[in-house]
Every structure is written in structure tokens, then in C-alpha cells.
Image (cartoon, rainbow, N blue to C red):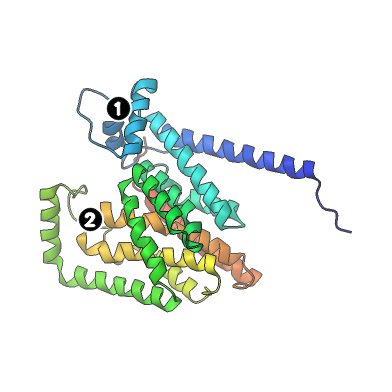
């Protein structure tokens, strides 16, 4: 005979869950703020933005301008509190989003820590907060609540200006009404990027010259990883095509994630000819994070996978996730 758990047991379970989440957030904040894994690619830039050592600091997004003011007053302009606060905020938002988008959010969180944590919370902390807000807005896309979505977009933009492209993500998800549309548009972007890389190398040099003149080029020269054959994005493309054979349009929640996954890949491939990673890669990473949620949802959904196929899908996702995390860790200089 089945006995339903009593209220005290459920309450105790929730308390333990919240305690573990709090502990996880605190540890992640300490790891990032203390630079325990090494110096990330953006660390020197953040030191210049948030510490005051006699030089003029550059302008920054409004939310971080306010946080910088508080940091100067409370912590004498040290950069560690900025990292700690950003990590706690970003991960809190993402955990909230994972819980609303997946019944196996703990598995999603585990895979996230193996991959995007190193890119976002450890390196690109401003974008990390904006992405957390975006993930919380996916429910608004799925339930067609444009006002709520645009309010979240405006808030996300206060933390990182790249969030403005959320507008185009909304438009894309409204236009993409079939799996075929997503596949065709994404693969067209791949072909487009290959054509320009192979046949327009001279144009690329002029684009870089223009970027240098106007100050957009922060990479110093053509980046080797800016290629249609980039292994990280090639594996994401493989996952996308694999999911296209399984996903069902009627499954509106996962289909929305699938469309966002497609949009992220489009950001990379269509903007690739610019050879400007600060734009194409940043935009792609803003949206590609949903692949973790989508793969876990499909692996545990009996309508898509048997138990064996589900484990196989998780294994493939784990492999891609580890590769993503490895690529991110290569940008970190060990202290």
C-alpha cells in the first residue's frame, strides 16, 4: 500500500535542498572570486573596470556602474566582491530557470558546472547575470508573454549590452514554426560561413582593419578558433541535428528550447565572417546554454527515448559538455 509522505518530511526535504543550493552557490562564489582555478581571460579587464589604482576607469553597464560605486565604498574597490556577487546572482537565476524548465534540473546543473560555469561565472561574469535573466524569460517565450519578456530583456541589458539581441531571439522563435525551418536556416548559416572563409579571406583582412580603426577588435588579430570547423561548435551542430530527428513540434516547451538552440548556432555561423569573437561567440554562448536543458529533458522523456537510448543521449551530452568545459579551461592561466 502506497503511503504519501507527510508534510514534515516534505518540508525537511525542501530545507535540505535549499541548504545544499546555498552551499553550492557559496562555494562557486568563493572559487570564482578567489580565482582558485587560475586567472581567466577577462580578469585583467575587470581589474581595470572595478579597482581604482590611479587610472581612469572605462564606462560600464548601468547595473555594474551602481555595483562599482557600492564596491568602492564598501570594499575599497577590490574586484573579488564583484565576482562573488555576480556568481551568486547569476547561478541563483539559472537554478531558478533550470527548476522551471526541467524536472531533472539537478542533472542539468551538474552538466552546466562541467561546461558553461567556466565560460560564464568564472570568466564573463557580466554576461553570466544577463544570461541568467534570459533563461528565466524562456517561459515567457513559450507562453507568448511579450511584455514580460521585453521587461526581462531590458533588465538583462542593464547587466550586459549583448542582451539586446534577445529581441531577435524572440522574433526568431515566432518565425520558426517547424523543425525543418530551424534545420534549413541553421545549415544555411554553416554553408554561408564556409563560403566566406574559403572565398573571402581578403575581405576578412579588411574587416579586421576596420575593427582596429573603430576599436571593436579586442583579439589583436585573426583568431584561430573563429572557423566553421571549430570543434566545439561542430559538436553542438551535431547535437542539434541529432535532436532534430527526435524532437516533436507538439512538445511546445522543448520545441522552444530547440528553436533557441538553433538561434544560438545561427549567431555563431552567420556572424562568423566578421571574425569578431567578441560579437559572434558571445552571442552564440548567450543562447547555446539551452542545449544542456534540452538534452536532459529528452533523455528522460519516454516519448523520445527508451531507457537505453536515454542513457546514450546523456552519455553523448556528457561528452560534448566535457569538451566545452575543456575548451573554456584552456583560456584560463593557472596561477
- Residue 264 seen: no
Visible in this render: residue 60? Answer: yes
Front residue (pair 235, 170): 170
Q: Secondary structure at mark 2?
A: loop
CA–CA distance in space, label 2 to label 1? 27 Å
Residue 139 locus on image (x, y percent): 51, 58
Q: Position of residue 15 (x, y in %)?
A: 68, 39
Residue 278 coordinates in the image, percent (x, y)? 26, 51
Q: Earlier in the sequence, mark 2 or mark 1?
A: 1
Q: Which residue is mark 2?
A: 276
Contact flag, marks 2 and 1 (Cβ < 8 Å): no
Disc 1 secondary structure class: loop
Seen at 35% across and 43% down, the residue is 158
Residue 80 pos. (x, y %): 39, 30
Quadrant that contains the N terminus: bottom right
Q: Which mark is residue 282?
A: none
Residue 94 left/right relative to 161? right
Pick out the residue farthest to the right: 1
- Circle 1 residue: 51
* Residue 305 drawn above or below residue 289: below
Label 2 environment density (alpha carbons within 10 Å; few <14, some 14–19, many ≥20): many
Question: Pointer 1: residues within 10 angstroms few (<14), some, or many (20+)?
Answer: some
Amino acid at each position: 500500500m502506497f503511503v504519501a509522505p507527510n508534510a514534515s518530511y516534505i518540508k525537511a526535504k525542501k530545507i535540505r535542498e535549499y541548504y545544499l543550493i546555498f552551499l553550492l552557490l557559496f562555494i562557486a562564489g568563493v572559487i570564482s572570486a578567489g580565482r582558485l582555478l587560475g586567472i581567466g581571460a577577462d580578469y585583467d579587464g575587470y581589474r581595470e573596470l572595478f579597482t581604482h589604482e590611479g587610472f581612469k576607469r572605462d564606462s560600464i553597464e548601468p547595473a555594474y556602474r551602481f555595483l562599482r560605486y557600492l564596491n568602492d565604498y564598501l570594499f575599497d574597490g577590490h574586484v573579488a566582491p564583484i565576482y562573488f556577487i555576480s556568481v551568486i546572482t547569476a547561478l541563483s537565476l539559472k537554478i531558478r530557470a533550470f527548476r522551471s524548465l526541467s524536472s531533472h534540473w539537478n542533472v542539468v546543473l551538474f552538466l552546466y558546472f562541467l561546461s558553461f560555469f567556466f565560460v560564464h561565472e568564472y570568466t564573463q561574469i557580466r554576461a553570466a547575470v544577463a544570461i541568467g535573466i534570459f533563461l528565466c524569460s524562456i517561459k515567457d517565450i513559450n507562453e507568448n508573454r511579450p511584455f514580460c519578456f521585453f521587461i526581462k530583456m531590458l533588465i538583462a541589458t542593464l547587466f550586459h549590452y549583448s542582451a539586446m539581441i534577445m529581441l531577435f531571439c524572440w522574433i526568431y522563435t515566432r518565425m520558426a514554426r517547424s523543425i525543418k525551418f530551424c534545420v534549413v536556416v541553421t545549415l544555411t548559416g554553416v554553408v554561408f560561413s564556409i563560403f566566406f572563409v574559403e572565398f573571402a579571406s581578403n575581405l576578412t583582412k579588411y574587416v579586421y582593419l576596420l575593427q582596429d580603426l573603430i576599436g571593436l577588435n579586442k583579439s589583436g588579430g585573426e583568431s584561430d578558433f573563429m572557423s566553421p570547423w571549430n570543434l566545439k561548435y561542430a559538436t553542438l551542430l551535431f547535437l542539434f541535428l541529432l535532436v532534430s530527428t527526435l524532437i516533436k513540434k507538439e512538445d511546445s516547451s522543448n520545441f522552444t528550447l530547440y528553436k533557441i538552440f538553433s538561434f544560438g548556432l545561427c549567431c555563431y555561423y552567420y556572424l562568423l565572417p566578421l571574425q569578431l569573437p567578441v560579437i559572434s561567440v558571445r552571442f552564440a554562448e548567450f543562447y547555446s546554454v539551452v542545449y544542456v536543458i534540452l538534452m536532459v529533458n529528452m533523455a528522460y522523456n519516454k516519448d523520445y527515448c527508451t531507457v537505453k537510448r536515454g542513457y546514450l543521449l546523456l552519455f553523448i551530452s556528457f561528452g560534448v559538455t566535457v569538451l566545452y568545459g575543456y575548451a573554456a579551461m584552456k583560456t584560463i592561466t593557472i596561477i
